[in-house]
Amino acid sequence: MGRKPKVNKKEKLRALADYREGVRSRKAIANDLNVNIKTLYKWNVLYDAHGEAAFDERATNRPYSRTDKTQAVEAYPDGTCTMRGILKKYKITHSSLLRRWIRQCIMTMRNLRTTTRKGRYT
């Protein structure tokens, strides 16, 4: 069963339009919708990256291919792209997801380096 958002798509789009056009402040919008100001910032970033589709309800989480995950993780330490740029390029919905992939990659690399040889860790 899908997750029910606290604020529906129509309200999010109206809030972003008001904010972008300067009709209301972020604080006023956040108070009206009973959300944190940082949430409005995240909605703005998602809207910039994915347009209105960012707020479509899904029954399941979006699947990412192994190649997309690998390319996104490899692009981050290169410094060729910012975190926001990587999120936009690979259509990743949240930065926490990319950070989790990076952490998993680091742990995998550590596990590969700490293999035992003759009963000793290297």
Image: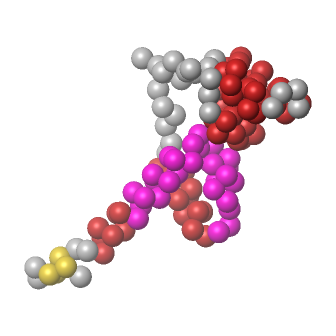
Residue 18 is left or right of residue 118, and the answer is: right
Q: Quadrant of residue 50?
A: top right
Q: Which residues are magenta?
A: 79-106
Look at the image and tell me whether residue 53 can be seen.
no
Q: Quadrant of residue 21?
A: top right
Residue 120 is left or right of residue 62, and the answer is: left
Q: Is residue 56 above or below residue 97?
A: above
**Is 112 or 25 nearer to us in this picture?**
25
Q: Quadrant of residue 107?
A: bottom left
**Is 42 or 110 nearer to us in this picture?**
42
- Residue 102 belongs to the span the image colors magenta: yes
- Is the stretch drawn in magenta largely helix, strand or loop? helix
Residue at far left of view: 119
Q: Residue at x 22, y 74 (%)?
A: 115
Q: Is residue 93 above or below residue 78?
A: above
**Total number of numbered labels?**
0
Q: Residue at x 83, y 27 (%)?
A: 24
Look at the image and tell me whether residue 5 can be seen.
yes
Q: Residue at x 53, y 59 (%)?
A: 73
**Is 108 or 33 nearer to us in this picture?**
33
In the image, residue 67 lies at what x, y percent?
A: 51, 53
In the image, residue 25 lies at what x, y percent?
A: 81, 32
